[in-house]
Amino acid sequence: MISKGTIHKIINKSDILLYLKYRIFKIKWRKRNKHNFTIAMNAFDLNKVKVGNGTYGKLNVKHFGNENEMLIIGNYCSIAPETIFILGGEHNYHTLSTYPFQNKYGHNKNESIVRGPIIVEDDVWIGYGAVIMSGVTVGRGSIIGAKSVVTKDVPPFAIVGGVPAKVIKYRFNNTIQAKISKLDLSTLSFTQIIDKMDYLNMQVNEENIDEIISKIEGEE
């Protein structure tokens, strides 16, 4: 019979190994992502998560071993704490039971359903505790409200919230949206960002949008 002390030692050793693996993973993640400010909160397949320039936040990535799982996050996104990206793991509810019998009692088959990659385009702000489901594209410049559950695509520049998340309003009118969409902030160097900081933080309207874009792009 195994004593309680031995059990505790085994558990503690297992916890230590998991901790060390996670620490090593975090180091690998940061080496690959010096161009952004993200922190990996759990270990995942490094080849299935891509993040662009300047994006910051803690990445909670829930993955289930399906080869089609993927998370792509664009440039200059803001990810609030407790945000969760669920890359798959859905069950088939069109069968007699939603239980994964083949996985648990058959041949250890991965039955998790993936609806497609999660794609977060540039300049997205994700609020505290939001959940993003597989197969969703979050459009450029959009905002996701705190605690929202995103199950469908989010249009560019939309502000969404709720469970499930729905469009509340848009940040800009169609004219301004079209002009901002042509601007590629990812091409700016660190020095250019510093030099153009005032224009990057200027409140936008129809009267000044052309001038702001012109200054950011370096045109006279």
Image (cartoon, grey):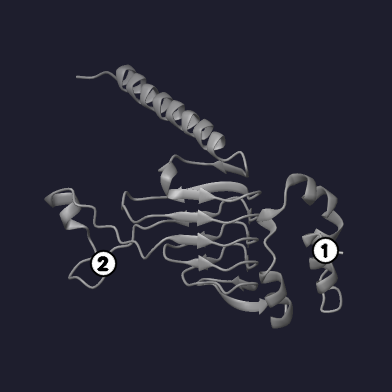
Residue 205 in sight in this render: yes
Residue neighbourhood size for the residue with mark 2, other residues' Cα within 10 Å, grouped as few (<14), some (14–19), many (≥20): some
Q: CA distance from mark 1 to mark 2?
A: 54 Å
Give the residue at x 42% y 62%: 134
Residue tagged by mark 1?
Answer: 219
Q: Are marks 1 and 2 in contact (CB under 8 Å)?
A: no
Q: Position of residue 178 (x, y in %)?
A: 68, 77
Three-letter amino acid code of the residue under disc 1:
Glu
Find numbered disc 2 in the image and state the secondary structure of the residue it sits on: loop
> For numbered disc 1, what is the local secondary structure?
loop
* Residue situated in front as seen by the camera: 118 or 7: 118
138 vs 86: above or below = below
* Residue highlighted by disc 2: 92
User: Taking 218 as reference, is 25 left or right?
Assistant: left
**The C terminus lies in quadrant:** bottom right
Q: Find residue 66 and report its horizontal and vertical position in percent.
A: 31, 53
Residue at the image point whose x is 45% and y is 29% from the top: 19
Where residue 185 appears, x then y in whole percent?
69, 58
Eyeballing the image, is 33 above or below 144? above
Viewer can see residue 171:
no
